[in-house]
Image (tube, rainbow, N blue to C red):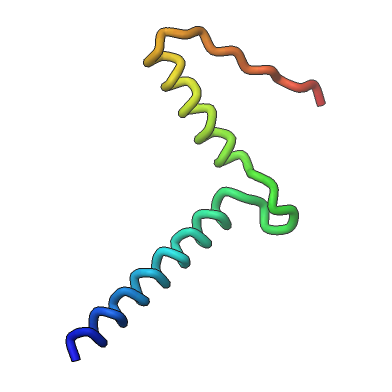
Amino acid sequence: MSYQRRSRTGSRSAAAEIATAHAYKLAQHDILTGLPNRSLLNQSLRQIIAVAQRDGHAGRLPVPRL
């Protein structure tokens, strides 16, 4: 009986992980196009800046003209 409880708990946690990953994707990507949105861009830029500061590098960011 305890084995069945463990497997149910395991499947619940797996389902929760899948739901969390799906929610993260929806929050970070445009629903219609699936392209990354501004939130993901800001997160990536913060990470790039933090790594550059940690390593003592000057970061460069190409900015396209629209």
- Of 18 and 31, the residue lying toward us: 18
User: Is residue 46 left or right of 60 when viewed as pictured?
Assistant: left
Residue 62 sits in which quadrant?
A: top right
Q: Quadrant of the N terminus?
A: bottom left
Q: Residue furthest right?
A: 66
Above or below, 15 against 59 in this view is: below
Q: Residue furthest left?
A: 2
Above or below, 23 against 46 in this view is: below
User: Is residue 4 left or right of 49 when viewed as pictured?
Assistant: left
User: Is residue 30 left or right of 24 when viewed as pictured?
Assistant: right
Residue lying at 53% horizontally and 27% vertically, measured from the top left = 45
Q: Position of residue 15 (x, y in %)?
A: 42, 72
Residue 64 sits in which quadrant?
A: top right
Q: Residue furthest front?
A: 3
Q: Position of residue 4 (x, y in %)?
A: 26, 87
Q: Position of residue 66 (x, y in %)?
A: 81, 26
Q: Position of residue 31 (x, y in %)?
A: 67, 58
How many numbered circles are shown? Answer: 0
Residue lying at 50% horizontally and 55% vertically, measured from the top left = 24
Residue 32 sits in which quadrant?
A: bottom right
